[in-house]
Image (cartoon, rainbow, N blue to C red):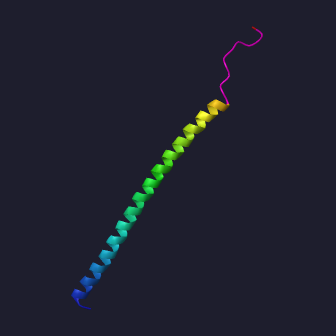
Amino acid sequence: MTDSDRITELEIALAHQTRIAEELSEEVRRQGRVVDRMERALRELGERFLTLEEVAMPRPEITKPPHY
């Protein structure tokens, strides 16, 4: 194998690794966007739950006990 052949093989391997690294980077970005959307949805659901809980179970009024 000549030096030229070895360099060509190394260039091919580097090109494949570069492509794979770019694909993985894009996947990480995509997953980050998914996680962001899920966090927003979870936060909104939590707020809705608290609102429903307040409506369904209102806090008792502070009153004096009947023996006063």
Name the residue at 63% across, 34% down: 53
- How many marks can you see? 0
* Quadrant of the rendering where the N terminus is positioned: bottom left
In the rendered image, the residue lying farthest to the bottom is 1
Is residue 63 part of the magenta span, yes or no?
yes
Identify which residue is drawn at 32% across, 71% down. 18
Q: Residue at x 67, y 19 (%)?
A: 61
Q: Residue furthest top?
A: 68
Q: Position of residue 34 (x, y in %)?
A: 46, 54
Q: Is residue 9 left or right of residue 33?
A: left
- Return the residue nearer the eye: 49 or 24: 49
Q: Residue furthest right?
A: 67
**Chief secondary structure of the magenta portion:** loop
- Residue appearing at x 37%, y 71% in the figure: 20
- Whether 59 is drawn above or below 18: the answer is above
Answer whether residue 22 is magenta in the image: no
Q: What percent of the width, then of the height, locates residue 54?
A: 62, 30
Which residue reaches farthest left?
Answer: 4
Front-lying residue, 42 or 14: 42
Query: Seen in the image, is 6 located left or right of residue 27?
Result: left
The magenta stretch is: 57-67
Quadrant in which the C terminus appears = top right
Q: Is residue 53 above or below residue 17?
A: above
Give x and y (percent) for residue 64.
70, 12
